[in-house]
Every structure is written in structure tokens, then in C-alpha cells.
Image (cartoon, grey):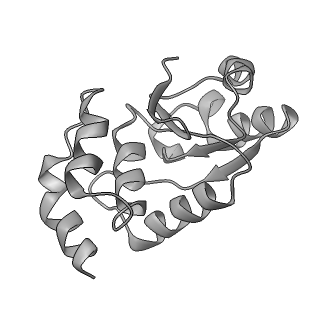
Amino acid sequence: MEIRALTPDYAVSPQIEPADVAAIKAAGYTTVICNRPDREIPEPLRAEVIGREVEAAGMTFVVNPVFPGALTEENVQIQSKAIQSSTGPVFAYCASGNRSSIVWALAHVGKHPTDHLISIPARFGYQLEGLRPMLDARAKG
């Protein structure tokens, strides 16, 4: 597992395993968000399995599957609410961390300039430049 901190309060990662939960907890995260749909992964890595481990470790677990090419406004709202209601730093994962970066950026439109929302994930290789028109349009309201 590789924790990629976009900000001090939000990190993304490729798919995690149940054994990774202790390290996530030790790193100080209090909320874990699963952005990966179960149909993409084998049963031992599905949200229910990871969620049990996360909750047993005393963290909050949120399931918010983002389907490739089918991001919804509901996905953005769920991610935003989970981030806002977290009692500490948030750790989100999907297949690569890209979808978790995208919903983070969309949840922060209007709070940060578009360039910031694109450049932060780019440090980890996540290319959100194609979202610039959407981010700009949402910022204008």
C-alpha cells in the first residue's frame, strides 16, 4: 500500500487489503472511503471485508463506489459529506487512486482554485487536466 497525501487531511491510494488497515490507522486516518466498485475486485478485497476491518480498528468506513466513466453528483456529495464529517484525516482508495482524487477535486470546487485542484493530484501522476472545464463551470456555479 502506498499512501499518497494530497493534503494533510486527505490521502488516496490504490486498492488496499485488510492487512493494510492497521497501517492506515497508525498513520492517523480516522475515516476510510472506498471508491472502488465491488464488481471490479475479488471477494477478499470487497468493501464489506475491508469495512469490517476498518470499523474493528475504530475508524469510520464509507462506501462510495465510483464507476469508471460514470461519476455522479451523488458520488461527489457523498465524498464531500464524508470529508466534512470526519473527525480527522481521510484516506480514500480505488483501483489506482485516480477516482478518489477526482471526487476530492470536485468536492473542493469553490474552496480552492482550479489550478490547485489539478496540480495537487498531478504530483502523484493523476491527470485531472481534462476536468478543467467541469471544475471551472462548477466554480462559476
With respect to residue 137, does 45 lie above or below? above
The answer, for residue 67, to whether it is visible in the render is no
Please count the marks in the image: 0
With respect to residue 52, does 106 lie above or below? below
- Residue closest to the eye, 18 or 102: 102
- Residue closest to the eye, 105 or 140: 140
The answer, for residue 30, to whether it is visible in the render is yes
Q: Please state if 64 lies on the left or on the right of 30 as rendered.
A: left
Q: Quadrant of the C terminus?
A: bottom left
Q: Please state if 105 lies on the left or on the right of 94 as rendered.
A: left
Q: Residue 29: where, in percent of width, then height?
A: 68, 34
User: Looking at the image, which residue is at 78% across and 40% down?
Assistant: 59
User: Looking at the image, which residue is at 48% across and 44% down?
Assistant: 36
User: Looking at the image, which residue is at 44% across and 65% down?
Assistant: 76
> Which residue is farthest bottom?
141
Q: Residue 111: where, in percent of width, then height?
A: 39, 63
- Dividing the picture into quadrants, the one containing residue 32 is top right
User: Looking at the image, which residue is at 26% across and 58% down?
Assistant: 113
Q: Please state if 49 lies on the left or on the right of 37 as rendered.
A: right
Q: Residue 135: where, in percent of width, then height?
A: 23, 64
- Dividing the picture into quadrants, the one containing residue 70 is bottom left
